[in-house]
Image (cartoon, rainbow, N blue to C red):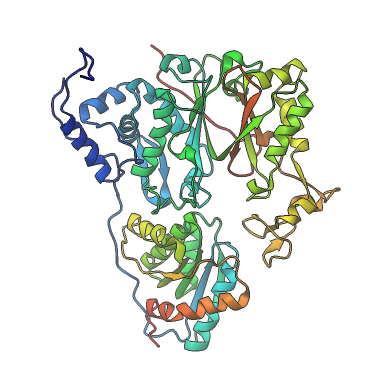
Amino acid sequence: MTGRERLLDPTGFDERTADTTLAPRPAGLRGLTVGLVDNTKPNAQVLLSEIAGELSRRFGTRGSRMYTKGYFGTPMEDDLLKQVAEECDVVVTAVGDCGSCSAATVADGIMLERAGIPAVSVISDSFLMSARAMAAVQGFPGFEFIAVEHPVASLDAGRLRDRVLAVMPDVQRILGAEA
Amino acid sequence: MSTVADAPLADAAEIRSALEYYAGRDWTDGLPVVPVTESYLAEFLATTSRDPDEVVFGVPHLNRQCTVRLAAINAALAGCLPEYFPVVLAAWDAFADEPYPKKGIWQSTTGTAPLLVVNGPVRERIGLNSKGNVFGSGFRANATIGRAIRLTAINVFGLRPHQLDQATQGTLAKYSACIAENEEESPWEPLHVEHGLSPSDSAVTAMVVRSCLHIEARHTRLPEQLGLDLADSIRRTGALIHETSSALIVLGPEHARVFAAAGWNKDDVRRFVFEHAVNSRSELAAVGKDAVSRHTRWRLPADHPDAVPDHASRSDDPDRVPALVAPGAVQVMVAGANNAGVSTIIEAFGPRDHAVAIARVGDLDD
C-alpha cells in the first residue's frame, strides 16, 4: 500500500505563452490591399469576394487578392501565411462552417494578427463553441471573429449577399474602420 | 446482508469523492474513471522502455502533444491494467501513420471514432476478445484500451463534445472501439502478417471509422452471393461524402470459410467487392451525388455552382460509378464466433487504397 497521494492531472498543458495582442490597426482602409483566404469550402470564395466588394465601395480599399489554403481542416501553411502577410494590409479568412475548419479559420486569424496583419475570421454561427475553444487553445481567449448565420454552403448568391451585409458592421469594427 | 464475507473494506465516500473530482473537471467520457496517482502511474511506465517525455502523438494545430506519460495516465484512468499499456502505445504509434487524425478529423461534424484492431500473441496474454461478442461488452482489455484513446482525445487534445469536437451525432463507437482478430479460426493470414509483420509479432492497426453495418447471410454457401451482399452494403449512397469510400470487412469465421471453401483468398474477396460496389449515374443523381465539389471533392449535385465531374464520368463507361477507388480500399479480417453467417462492415473515413496504419507492440519480450 502506498497510502494517500495527489490525484494526477490527465490533460496536456499549453506551452505557448498567451499573446492576446492584436496587430496595430490602420488609420483608415483607403488604398489598402485586402487579402482573402479561401479555405476551399463551398461558397467561401463568393462570400469573401462580397466582403471585399463592400470594403471597396465603402472605404475605397485598393483591391483584393484571393489565396487558397491547402486543406480546410488545419491552419494556413507557414509559406502562405508569410506571403499573405507580405502582400496584404488586412485579411479576411473564410469560411469556418464545419468542425475542424471553424477552429482552423480562427487559428488563421490569430496567426495573422500575430504576424502584424489585422484579420477577420468568418465562421458560421453553429460553430461558436469550437471557434472559441480554438482561440483558447491558441493562447488568445476572447479573440473576436465574425459568425454569420448557418448555413453557408447551400446558399444562392442573393442569400449569401444578405449574410454579408448583416455582418459588415462587425467586419468594419474588427478592422478598426468605424463607419 | 448483501455482502460476501471476504469482500475488502473500503471508504466508499472517499472513493466517490475522487470520482466526482474527475467528473467535476470534465476529465471523463461521462463514465467514472479510475483514480490515478504517481505510484500507480509508475506501474504503467515500468511496462515500457520509452522515455515518459517522448511524444507519441501530436496535433500541431491544437498546440497539444501526447507524451508517454500522458498516454499512461489516461490509460490508467480508462481502467487499463499496466500490462495493457504497450498495446496503447502501439495504438498511438499507428495513429501517427493515419492521415486524418492530425488533420482535424476528430473535430469534424462527420463524427468518426478511432478503431483499433489487435493481432498476435498479445491478444491471449492480456485477454483481448476476438470471438463471440467481439464488438460487445464484457472484456476488460477491449473495453479499456479503446477507452484509453478516447480519454486521451478528451483530456490531452481538448476534444470535448460541444467544444473542439463538433460531431453532429458522433457514433456509439466513440466510447471505446478495440477488437482483436480471430486468427485461430481464420482460413487466411492475419491482418498484421498481410502487412509485413511476422505471425509472432503483436500489432495494432488504427483506423478512423464512421459506422458499423450488420451483414446477415446465413443461407448461402456461394461466395458470389455473399460477396454481392457485402458490395451492396459498401456502395450505399448514404455513406458517400467523398468521391469514393473505404471499408474494413470483419468476416465472421463462417463467412470467411464460405469464401475459403470456394478457393478465394483475401485478394479475391477484395477484387470481387471492388468490381461490384458500383452505383449507376442515375442512382447517384437521384440522391444529388452525381458530381463532386471543385476543391474538397465532396459529392454534390451536377447543377451545384461548385460542381465538377467526378473521375468516373471521364471513363469509358461514365454511367458506372465505382464506390471504391481500388480493391485495396477494402481491408479484410476475421473476428467473432464460428456460429452463424454474420459479418460486419466497418465504414472507414476517406477514400484510400491499401493504406493501413499499423504498428508493432513493443516491450513484450520477457
Quadrant in the picture for residue A85: bottom left
**Quarter the C terminus of chain A occupies:** bottom left
Q: Nearer the viewer, residue B176 or A178?
A: B176
Residue located 48% across and 49% down the image: B104
State the image coordinates of residue B344 (x, y, percent, origin top left).
61, 31
Instruction: Report whether B19 appears left or right of B310.
Output: left
Determine if residue A62 is in view.
no
State the image coordinates of residue A42 (x, y, percent, origin top left).
60, 64
Q: Is residue B23 shown above or below A104?
A: above
Q: Is residue B133 shown above or below B210?
A: above
State the image coordinates of residue A19 (x, y, percent, origin top left).
29, 62
Residue located 37% across and 50% down the image: B63
Q: Nearer the viewer, residue A10 or B227?
A: B227
Instruction: Report whether B69 appears left or right of B142.
Output: left
Instruction: Report whether A144 appears left or right of B264.
Output: left
Q: Nearer the viewer, residue A89 or A178?
A: A178
Residue located 43% across and 17% down the image: B127
Farthest right residue in view: B316
Determine if residue B119 is in view.
yes
State the image coordinates of residue A151 (x, y, percent, origin top left).
53, 66
Q: Nearer the viewer, residue B307 or B279?
A: B279
Q: Is residue B229 shown above or below A78?
A: above
Instruction: Report whether B199 appears left or right of B88.
Output: right
Quadrant in the picture for residue B65: top left
Q: Is residue A53 shown above or below B145?
A: below
**Quarter the N terminus of chain A occupies:** top left
